[in-house]
Image (spheres, helix red, strand yellow):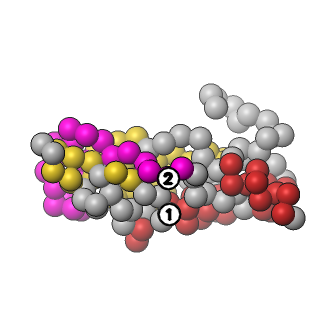
């Protein structure tokens, strides 16, 4: 089983965060966009491909809504799946991994601010077929 750990950790995610909208009502921040978007600090993505789905070559995309505080930390209790993959285990793996993400905070006029963003997670098997409409 140890041979599977390397591909499982490498193939978890292929994109970095995209800003969807800043803070909004949840954080009490204004609706203006930040001057500087948050930047992911993780060297390696923390998402773990569920072994049973990996062995079956089941792939999928999950889109998460993340809330980052003014320090750039993910507020894990607020992470939500906004576009499920169709496989509960992939969705759960994406949510679990999101808690390990670290960001340089977004800033407005030089001041760190909380923001909300969409974060895509792509689970790909090296021998899998590309899903229809996928460009990865």
Q: Quadrant of the N terminus?
A: bottom right
Which of the 4 quarters of the picture holds residue 75?
Answer: bottom left
Q: Quadrant of the C terminus?
A: top right
- Front residue of 6 and 30: 6
- Front residue of 79 and 108: 108
Give the left or right position of residue 118, taking residue 38 as reference: right
Residue 85 picture location, percent across and down? 61, 51
Give the left or right position of residue 73, taking residue 101 as reference: left
Q: Can residue 18 be seen in this view?
A: yes
Residue 48 picture location, percent across and down? 66, 59
Q: Label 1, secondary structure: give it.
A: loop
Disc 1 vs disc 2: Cβ atoms closer than 8 Å? yes
Q: What stretch is highlighted in magenta?
A: 22-43
The residue located at (55%, 66%) in the rendering is 96
Residue 60 is covered by the magenta coloring: no
Tell me the crowding category of disc 2: few under 14, some 14 to 19, or many 20 or more residues within 10 angstroms, Cα based. few
Q: In this view, does 133 lie above or below 68?
A: above
The residue located at (50%, 63%) in the rendering is 100
First along the sequence among labels 1 and 2: 2
Residue 26 is covered by the magenta coloring: yes
Q: In this view, does 15 lie above or below 78?
A: above
Q: Name the residue under label 2.
A: 42
Q: Which mark is residue 100?
A: 1
Q: Distance between the residues labelled 1 and 2?
A: 9 Å
Q: Is residue 118 visible?
A: no
């Amino acid at each position: 089983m140890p041979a599977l750990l390397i591909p499982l950790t490498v193939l978890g995610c292929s994109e970095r965060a995209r800003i969807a909208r800043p803070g909004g009502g949840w954080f009490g921040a204004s609706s203006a966009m930040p001057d500087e978007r948050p930047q992911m600090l993780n060297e390696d993505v923390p998402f773990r491909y569920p072994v049973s789905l990996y062995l079956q070559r089941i792939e999928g995309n999950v889109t998460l809504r993340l809330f980052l505080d003014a320090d750039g930390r993910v507020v894990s209790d607020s992470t939500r799946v906004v576009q499920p993959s169709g496989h509960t285990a992939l969705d759960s793996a994406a949510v679990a991994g999101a808690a390990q993400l670290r960001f340089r905070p977004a800033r407005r006029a030089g001041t760190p601010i909380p923001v909300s963003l969409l974060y895509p997670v792509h689970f790909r098997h090296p021998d899998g077929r590309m899903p229809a409409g996928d460009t990865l």
